[in-house]
Amino acid sequence: MLTVGLTGGIASGKTLVSEQFAALGVPIVDADVAAREVVVPGSEGLRAVVEAFGPAVTAPDGSLDRAALRRRIFDDEAARRALEEILHPRIRTRMHAALSRLRDAGHAYCVEAVPLLVETSQYAHCDRVLVVDAPEAIQVQRLLRRDGGTTAQARAILARQAPRWDRIRLADDVIANGDDVAPAIALGCQIAGLDRKYRLLAAVSH
């Protein structure tokens, strides 16, 4: 099974790209979904997070208060690393299990969506790296529309991720998503072409 690692900066359009691949029947293994699953109420992952950061990071219903956790780690590098040490191994284990199930089911290829694919060097086990790219000015605009806040805050979030050109340098394929006028049409054409390409590559490498 061909594994395509999908990544991109925040607000670049990774979710929309994943959805369009899924609409073509491509299985998606999503790190964000796995990250939510490993900290569901009652999970060993959530217990580990609460032990490390205290009950203030839980909501009244016992679930993880993600906003409180983000505030806790935003300007604290040691806290961020501690959280990654708790979550990343659990997320990878869950994703590897999902990939194994898809491989056993005989799928031609799958998309492994990992926002921090470059930062965590997970691209090493992917057959191809697909980067969704948008100019930083567009990312800032989208962040402000989506989350509010200030331009300075949006740029601070971008600064915590791998530089745009580092991602592109590692890419085998790039989807340009700087079109805010007709994004679905522009993306659809690119994704349809990549789907054909990946199916051919999977058939040749089988």
Image (cartoon, rainbow, N blue to C red):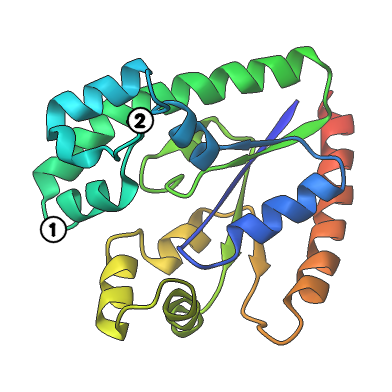
**24 relative position to 43: left or right:** right
Identify which residue is drawn at 64% across, 35% down: 127
Question: Can you say whether 179 is above or below 94 in the image?
Answer: below
Q: Nearer the viewer, residue 66 or 114?
A: 66
Q: How crowded is mark 2: few (under 14 residues within 10 Å), some or many (20 or more)?
A: some
Q: Nearer the viewer, residue 39 or 119?
A: 39
- x and y, in percent, of residue 111 in the image: 68, 40
Question: Can you say whether 40 is above or below 155 in the image?
Answer: above
In the picture, the disc for residue 67 is: none
**201 relative position to 58: left or right:** right
Identify which residue is drawn at 62% across, 56% down: 15
**201 relative position to 83: left or right:** right
Give the residue furthest to the front: 60
Q: Under tag 2, what secondary structure?
A: helix
Q: Name the residue under label 1.
A: 75
Q: Residues within 10 Å of mark 1 (few under 14, many from 20)?
A: few
Q: Earlier in the sequence, mark 1 or mark 2?
A: 1
- x and y, in percent, of residue 113 in the image: 58, 43
Picture quarter containing residue 16?
Answer: bottom right
Tally the marks: 2
- Amino acid, disc 2: His
Task: Quarter of the image for the N terminus: give it.
Answer: top right
Picture quarter containing residue 185?
Answer: bottom right
**130 relative position to 49: left or right:** right
Q: Mark 2 points at which residue?
A: 88
Identify which residue is drawn at 20% across, 28% down: 50
- Amino acid, disc 1: Asp
Question: Can you say whether 129 is above or below 46 in the image?
Answer: below
